[in-house]
Amino acid sequence: MTPAARVAAAIEVLDRWLDGVPAEKALTGWARGARYAGSKDRAAVRDHVYDVLRRKGACEALGGADGRGLMLGLVRVQGVDPATVFTGEGHAPVPLSDAEKQAPDVRSDVWRDVPDWLHQPLRESLGARAADIVGAMQTRAPLYLRVNARKASVNQAQERLLEDGIKTETCPAEMALKVTEGDRRLRQSSAYLDGLVEIQDLSVQLACAAVDWPQRGRVLDYCAGGGGKALAIAAVSDATVFVHDAIAARMSDIPARASRAGVTLAETMKPSMHAPYDLVLCDVPCSGSGTWRRDPEAKWRLTPGRLAELGQLQRQIVEQAQTLVKPGGRLVYMTCSLLDAENEAVVNSVVSAPEWDLLTSARFLPPEASDGFFLAVMRRNGNG
């Protein structure tokens, strides 16, 4: 496919997205009907679509509200002359109309790329850095890896990755690597298949490194999902690590991932049977506002009603988890959210009870930490 044909394909996908089809489903549907498209073509079309979702407000202002307009806007955002893309030749988009040739005189504004109703909550949550952080979310996030300390040192992992053409550099987190070249080869690399590395964002690794995980006893990952954080704990702790999720299907990949990593994770659908725990981790469902660099679609799906529902769910999960922590034990609360309503507000509801103390809390913000992430560590008093 030519570069212009890839733009035309992205227009098709974006029109489906605007009709309510999730982005990944729209991309998959297009790819199934485009057997001629190679892997590089599919990757390029996907990049176009996600670049638009990151900058949807700017693209709409510079081009239009439909798929064609959004891609016209993206071409302008990227500093490319639209007339060289919208030629109508081959499989390129049809030539620009007279109206489309007139580039709007639009003032640059990072807040245009965030739904209007989120402007004030973000400003209140992020303070003076709000605009800079929102601006950082317009760019694609790098790929980060966590080196599995059970199987390799950072240097050993880098060497194995390099054998498969994957270049990396070290990061502030001790076991973190940033992929600088060859990211699309990762899942076929021997370092990944042999469990030397796992995909994990830098923000998560920084948060996990800030927790003093028990070396003995019992740890529960209460909202385990695919098990990424449980694997990180098991890599540095000899405690028995239990994993639980309200929807068991979310944990379907855990056995294979644990086997590859060379660790043991104990799945349980009834965590109360193994209580009390020395530490309970709650990485709760949230808005995902800290991950908009890699999942920009999430900001356009989020509504005030959904945010309120998430707040209620977060409190319910924390209330359940509190009962599983032994006296003197700890509750670790995590979100990938930038919003105080999902972070400090929930933590304050816990530590307002006399039997709970806040030991530490931290926010990890883009671009320095890649994604946005929140951590709080609370202790249940011995008389609790």
Image (cartoon, grey):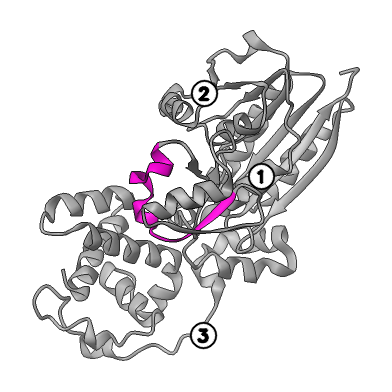
Q: Which mark is residue 334?
A: none
Identify the amino acid type marked 2: Ala
Q: Which residue is mark 2?
A: 246
In front of the other: label 2 or label 3? Answer: 2
Residue depicted at x 24% and y 67%: 11
Q: Residues within 10 Å of mark 1 (few under 14, many from 20)?
A: many
Residue 246 in the image: above or below residue 232: above
* Viewer-side residue, 86 vs 313: 86
Q: In the structure shown, which secondary structural element does the residue marked by tag 1 occupy? A: helix
Residue depicted at x 58% and y 39%: 310
Q: Residues within 10 Å of mark 3 (few under 14, many from 20)?
A: few
Q: Which residue is mark 3?
A: 107
Residue depicted at x 60% and y 42%: 308
Q: Which residues are magenta?
A: 176-193
**Image location of residue 354, percent across then percent down:** 89, 27
Measure how far apart labels 2 and 3 are at the Cα level. Answer: 46 Å
Identify the amino acid type marked 3: Arg
Q: In the structure shown, which secondary structural element does the residue marked by tag 2 occupy? A: loop
Say if the magenta span includes residue 151. Answer: no
Q: Which residue is mark 1?
A: 342
Among the 4 quarters of the image, the one containing residue 45: bottom left
